[in-house]
Image (cartoon, helix red, strand yellow):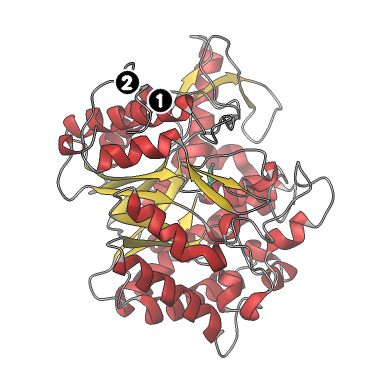
Amino acid sequence: MKNKKTDDLPLLKRTDFALDFRWGCSTSSYQIEGGVDLDGRGESIWDRFCATPGHIRDGSSGAVACDHYHRWPEDLDLARSLGTNAYRFSIAWPRIFANGRGLAPNQKGLDFYSRMVDGMLERGLEPWVTLYHWDLPQALQEQGGWANRDTVDAFVEYTDVVSRHLGDRIKHWITHNEPWCTAFHGNYEGVHAPGLKDVKTALQVCHNVLVSHGLAIPVIRRNVPGARVGAALSLHPLQPASDSAQDVAATKRHDGLRNRWFLDPLHGRGYPADIWRILGDKAPVVQDGDLATIATPTDFLGVNYYFPEIVADAPGVGVMSTQVIESDNVERTAFGWEVSPEGMVTLLGRLAKDYQPAEIYLTENGSTYDDVLSPEGNIDDVERRRYLVRHLQATREIVAQGIPVKGYFAWSLLDNFEWAEGYIRRFGLTHVDFETQQRRLKLSGEWYGAFLKGEL
Ligand code: FCB
């Protein structure tokens, strides 16, 4: 390694993990591609959301982002140079159907992803595709977006087209990325596209997204021999702010909407009754058969792990009368997210105990810090490197406990458009100069590469 400042790092080797463990980086279409007007791509809800002043902290958008639309060969070279064996990316639905649905898909959009998938395979990167990482076609939003049941049908049609075209080469399919964020950031908090603030809408969005997940699974299986399908959930280990009965009950409610609301129905248990009762008339409309659809068996559970939460009772606050407490004395990233590899161990232990998924993949994990470019042109991001090392140690511990974690995808390969934060928050193992589009591997990326290539 170029930089030897690794003394404080605990020993970790790739050979501590199974030979077939998946090692990758994770990305998403709107955050890196740019090229929003090219080759027949339609408008997405993020293009529209970014156009409204005040929505994005630095007033930016994903219009250019990392220009990955043109630079993907270079970016895949980078992923290969790290020694990864898998690569997670998402498809921009508006590249396939500019208006969300239609008689004929946009061939140029399909060709783009087809070339990129070939590029992955040529480089020994197993493609892991996400069908929905938040860039809904704006035309569907005009009809009510995910709150409209028709969007479920549109998603299934889009899934059919994509899986028919790419299923000969892609075997790993993630239907949705973080349905909680789709529903609540986008439709209740209003901080993500489409920027709505209505709890009933958010809960209907949530339900329809889960139904679309269940309906997409048999379509993928029909079109893709040997397909392995799952969803990627954002999950959080929770702790009550105190031992008081109120805080303990609040934590159970918070868990009910943040974690169980997804895990329970996906595992055939329906929606948690305690939460359903609290929601009252805000609960979603559920059609006959929906719960069975949502519970369609999957091959793996994708877990995006970032941080734990400490929860207090807060009558009248939010949907569940709960509040997340910012405790002092904890280590945080520049985003304010608590750094807690122990939390990941707790979370995965709980998943294994309560839900027994056959396989778990850590489909995202990563950190943002205020990177500084040294006079020599290096990014010595020791904090991000430490975050990565500690979470891989935690992963090793989880595997040692017999929990079936089979892969780890670092968020993210590149600094990118971090949604409402614009370009302020950098999560990349690679620095991107957004003026010149120059890529520069950070210390954390060097470490990941050295670890994966057995050079530590
Ligand atoms: C996750 C998102 C991903 C990225 C990371 C930092 O919630 O799935 O796109 O924004 O957070």
Q: How far apart, in angstroms, are the residues tagged by discs 2 and 1?
A: 7 Å
What residue is drawn where x is 52% and y is 56%? 28
Check if mark 2's residue and mark 1's residue have beta carbons within 8 Å.
yes
Left or right, residue 75 beside residue 299: right
Helix, strand or loop status at disc 2: loop
Three-letter amino acid code at the position of disc 2: Leu
What residue is drawn where x is 55% and y is 33%? 368
Residue 406 placed where, x, y %?
24, 46
Helix, strand or loop status at disc 1: helix
Q: 22 or 385: nearer the eye?
A: 385
Could you tell me which quadrant the N terminus lies in? top left
The extreme right residue here reads 53
Tell me the tag on residue 9: 2
Left or right, residue 418 beside residue 61: left
Q: 49 or 352: nearer the eye?
A: 49
Which circle's residue, 2 or 1, is located before the other in the chain? 2
Label 1: how many residues lie within 10 Å, few (<14), some (14-19) or many (20+)? some
Tell me the tag on residue 309: none
Could you tell me which quadrant the C terminus lies in? top left
Three-letter amino acid code at the position of disc 1: Arg
Q: Which residue is identified by label 1?
A: 386
In this picture, is 442 found above or below 308? below
Residue 319 placed where, x, y %?
65, 36
Left or right, residue 349 beside residue 184: left
What residue is drawn where x is 51% and y is 34%? 378
Label 2: how many residues lie within 10 Å, few (<14), some (14-19) or many (20+)? few
Whether residue 284 is visible to the viewer of this picture, yes or no, is no
Residue 334 placed where, x, y %?
60, 27
